[in-house]
Amino acid sequence: MPKDYIGEFRKANIKESYIPVLVSDRDKAQFALEAFGKSTNLVSPMTIASAIVNKKVDISKTTPEQLINSLKDIRSSVVSDDKQLETWVDLAIADNPKARDDIKKGKMQAVGVLIGSVMKYSKGKADVKKINDILQKKLT
């Protein structure tokens, strides 16, 4: 029964909200667990689970190895060079003075505008966590 896998997903530190989707059928649960076992630190179990749940991976047409390789390729294309990210952040701040001012006034939801602008400059390849860290340092 797929619900038997709940403990294994919890041990892998999978988000509680993902677990019901992953155990909704035996094939999906087994696919996820097989992918976790084959990832050998190349891709985290949480990243694999997120892809299965959010990107609705068609497990009938994809092997766990193909999913891992796809996720690894996506991760390797992420720009995390601090100097490049800072350049894009500076451009985003210059392009969005209202968002900058709102953040300085404590309206933190405006950070999304700046992150979106950086993502536009990076063609979607910037490391969002690093962008957020740089913005926090520059604006707070």
Image (cartoon, rainbow, N blue to C red):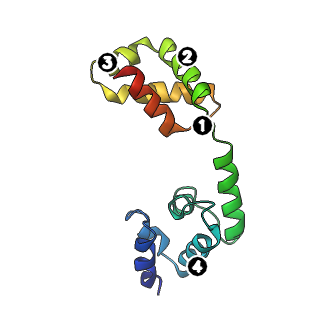
- Sequence-wise, the earlier of marks 1 and 4 is 4
Q: Nearer the viewer, mark 1 or mark 3?
A: 1
Q: Nearer the viewer, mark 4 or mark 3?
A: 3
Residue topped by disc 3: 104
How far apart are labels 1 and 3 at the CA level?
25 Å
How far apart are labels 2 and 1 at the CA level?
17 Å
Instruction: Give the amino acid type for the residue marked by disc 1 in the picture.
Output: Ser
Residue 34, position as x, y percentages in the image: 61, 76
Circle 2 SS class: helix
Residue topped by disc 2: 91
Task: Look at the image and tell me whether residue 62 can be seen.
Answer: no
Instruction: Give the amino acid type for the residue marked by disc 3 in the picture.
Output: Lys
Circle 4 SS class: helix
Residue topped by disc 4: 27
Q: Quadrant of residue 97?
A: top left
Instruction: Give the amino acid type for the residue marked by disc 2 in the picture.
Output: Leu
Seen at 53% across and 81% down, the residue is: 26
How far apart are labels 2 and 3 at the CA level?
17 Å
How far apart are labels 2 and 4 at the CA level?
47 Å
